[in-house]
Image (spheres, grey):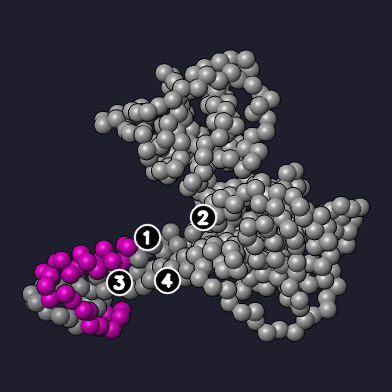
Amino acid sequence: MGMSIAEIDLVLPEIAGLVGRRLDGAWQPGRDRVVLGFGTDHLLLVPRGDHARVHHVTARPPNPARPYSFQGALRARLGATLRGVLRLPDERAVDLIFSSFNLHLRLTGRSGGLWLLCDGQPVAAHDGPVTKLSPFARHLSRPDPPRFAPASPAPWGANHAAEEWFAEREVELRLRQVQTGVVAGGRRALARLQRRLERLEADLLRGSKAPALREDGDLLAANLHQVRRGAQSIFVSDPTGETPGRTIGLDPRRAPGANLDALYAQARRFERASTLAGARKAETSLQAAALQAAIAAAEADPSALSALEGFLPAGHGRPEVPARAPWVRWVGPRGQEVLVGRSELGNRQLTFQLARRTDWWMHLRNAPGAHLLIRMAKGQTLTLETLLGAGQIALHAARLGAGASAEVTYARIRDVRPIPGERSGRVSVRAEKVLWVTMDPVALACWAADQR
């Protein structure tokens, strides 16, 4: 369950201390996670799910490789001043009132959400387009006491307690999800072993029929001269008189000799399968018993998951770690965003797939290296601070040391064109500008890189 009314009322007085501060950063690390920056303070908004909440955080999580549109809507309004923080009466909903817009946060489970309101009308939502706000669902207020208590003094005692409590719950949830996934993979593997045992049992049963097939073959061989071409069966008697006669089915499309060969071949197949099944059944039974014990241990104790994963084929255990993005994302002190290609593929994707017409392109002049993409919102102006920061990043990507200087070229992305047939990543640039940059680690210290 997300934050209760009592928990919201516990953290909001401390959040109200941000009133009068300017919004100078906005990030969206996930679909249901938004972080607002007020100088060195960061406010986390989780509008939906079992851990819906709002509280101060000590550090913001990194953004994904592809940003969400809601983040852009917020960044277009950076510089606005927080005028008030208000919880709606009898509702798990909070309004963050800014000078030019409001953020409406509902911590109501599946119906929760975060909306950007301008003049009282929603213009953006954390999870996609929005047309109007739905009314609150009817419910009975639950006087639940807070599940956490301030463990440190003001100004963020209650908020840090909330941060620690919800972080622990999320770790427990991720562990349960991993445990559920690995155990489910173990059960699938056990089901495969059980199906294999069933097939081996069937092979053993067929193997028990091999002697009768050989006996039919011997009887047919003794009476082969009586078989007429096209016959579907023949009644044969044992020339030794030890067994009564029997009817043997035949394939009318085969010659008599071919029917005899088919009987002996089938007997050999059954004997061979039975021999292999006998050895494999014992081995498979041991594997199934060990896997069943590992599943039971993993269900009882998550620390036994590693032992269970040893039984699973690749890709059936823990969720795979997502592939690393082909570019590095840098974030500046005011939320500026610069993407740096890791490879030729990353350079091409940045410049000709990810880039928008409002972005700027940068590269080390007359030298091979990474392409840089300076992300700019519509109507936003490239400032000297952002330009110099991107230049420092370009020199850092080129592995130049402190004090080294180089020229970087930059241009609007619409002025960058691919060279036909060029595979090394070179581009043609018109209306380019040149900037002389000296590497200064201190100037780069205010930028943060997401190396995922």
First reached walking from the N terminus: tag 4 or tag 3 = 4
Q: Is residue 36 above or below residue 89?
A: above
User: Mark 2 highlights which residue?
Assistant: 69
Q: Residue furthest top?
A: 404
Crowding around mark 3 (Cα neighbors within 10 Å: few <14, some 14 to 19, many 20+) is some
User: Mark 1 highlights which residue?
Assistant: 272
Q: Amino acid at mark 4?
A: Ala
440 vs 220, nearest the viewer? 440
Q: Is residue 245 left or right of residue 166?
A: left
Quarter of the image holding residue 14? bottom right
User: Mark 4 highlights which residue?
Assistant: 202
Quarter of the image holding residue 267? bottom left
Question: Which residues lie in the magenta part?
Answer: 241-269
Element class at badge 3:
helix
Q: Is residue 100 left or right of residue 151?
A: left
First reached walking from the N terminus: tag 3 or tag 1 = 3
User: Mark 3 highlights which residue?
Assistant: 213
**Residues at badges 4 and 2 in contact (C-beta under 8 Å)?**
no
Q: Residue at x 72, y 63 (%)?
A: 53
First reached walking from the N terminus: tag 3 or tag 2 = 2
